[in-house]
Image (cartoon, grey):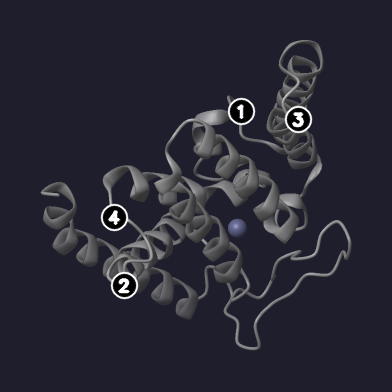
């Protein structure tokens, strides 16, 4: 599933839930939701976010960069910071380095809790609590959306190495898959165009 589709799903849902006062709608919140919708795919060297993170988009570079980043956070924490959430980020990045696409930590509930928990903890400390729910919406819906594709996701990694999927799935890149993804992006854009004045004028 493309990054744009994931952003579309996240943003549509955040805007829709804000109608029921479950999310506070703000430009910052939508941005956090959009980035969180892209985060699970950092296990793929050619993912949208990795376009900006990786200098060369292949598996070896992805593994090296995330592994190094993880070790950097762990050392930084060990010698200077001594903060639980910095340690969590470190472990998360090391595991991301060794995760193959959809079969590792980022596409699991463990990943959702690690990343979401860390983000939530930092958000509370630095006073941007209103971004916690948009983060979970973006990340969580990414996992659910990927379960509708025929490869499924490693929901219970590292406890179970099985990929889980929905009873009805579609193949990424197939006619129905592309139609479905195109529709989501279009609806997202239309929805956002209508809602944007409301968000900006608040
Ligand atoms: Zn994914």
Q: Quadrant of residue 112?
A: bottom right
Q: Is residue 15 above or below residue 40?
A: below
In front: label 1 or label 4 = 4
CA–CA distance between discs 2 and 3? 36 Å
Q: Which mark is residue 25?
A: 4
Q: CA distance from mark 1 to mark 4?
A: 36 Å
Viewer-closest of 100 and 25: 25
Crowding around mark 3 (Cα neighbors within 10 Å: few <14, some 14 to 19, many 20+) is many
Reading the image, the residue beneath label 3 is: 87
**Element carrying mark 3:** helix
- Residue positioned 75% across, 51% down in the render: 105
Query: On screen, 59 above or below 15?
Result: above
Instruction: Tell me the quadrant of ligand 1.
Output: bottom right
The image quadrant that residue 71 belongs to is: top right
Which image quarter: residue 67? Answer: top right
SS assignment at label 2: loop
Cβ(mark 1) to ligand 1 < 8 Å? no
Q: Are marks 4 and 2 in contact (CB under 8 Å)?
A: no
On the image, numbered disc 2 is attached to which residue?
A: 20
User: Which residue ends up furthest to the bottom in the rendered image?
Assistant: 167
- Residue plotted at (57% across, 41% down): 119
Left/right placement of residue 4 relative to residue 195 reads right
Q: Indicate which disc residue 56 carries.
A: 1
Evaluate if marks 3 and 1 touch, with contact meaning CB atoms under 8 Å apart: no
Determine the CA span between mark 3 and mark 1: 27 Å
For the residue labelled by badge 1, is the local secondary structure a helix, a strand or a loop? loop
Residue 51 in the image, given as x and y percentages of width and height: 51, 35
- The residue positioned 87% from the left and 64% from the top of the image is 161
Which of the two discs, 4 and 2, labels the residue nearer the N terminus? 2
Q: Nearer the viewer, residue 202 or 64?
A: 202
Does mark 3's beta carbon lie closer than 8 Å to ligand 1? no
Residue mark closest to the camera, 2 vs 1: 2
């Amino acid at each position: 599933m493309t990054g744009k589709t994931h952003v579309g799903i996240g943003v549509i849902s955040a805007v829709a839930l804000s109608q029921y006062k479950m999310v506070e709608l703000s430009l910052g919140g939508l941005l956090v939701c959009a980035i969180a919708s892209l985060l699970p795919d950092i296990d793929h060297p050619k993912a949208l976010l990795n376009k900006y993170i990786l200098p060369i988009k292949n598996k070896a570079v992805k593994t090296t960069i995330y592994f190094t980043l993880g070790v950097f956070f762990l050392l930084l924490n060990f010698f200077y910071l001594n903060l639980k959430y910095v340690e969590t980020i470190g472990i998360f990045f090391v595991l991301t380095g060794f995760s193959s696409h959809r079969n590792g930590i980022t596409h699991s509930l463990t990943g959702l809790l690690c990343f979401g928990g860390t983000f939530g903890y930092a958000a509370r400390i630095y006073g941007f609590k209103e971004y916690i729910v948009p983060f979970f919406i973006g990340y969580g819906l990414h996992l659910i959306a990927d379960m509708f594709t025929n490869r499924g996701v490693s929901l219970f990694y590292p406890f179970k190495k099985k990929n889980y999927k929905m009873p009805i799935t579609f193949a990424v890149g197939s006619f129905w898959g592309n139609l479905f993804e195109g529709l989501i992006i279009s609806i997202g854009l239309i929805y956002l165009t209508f809602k944007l004045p409301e968000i900006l004028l608040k």
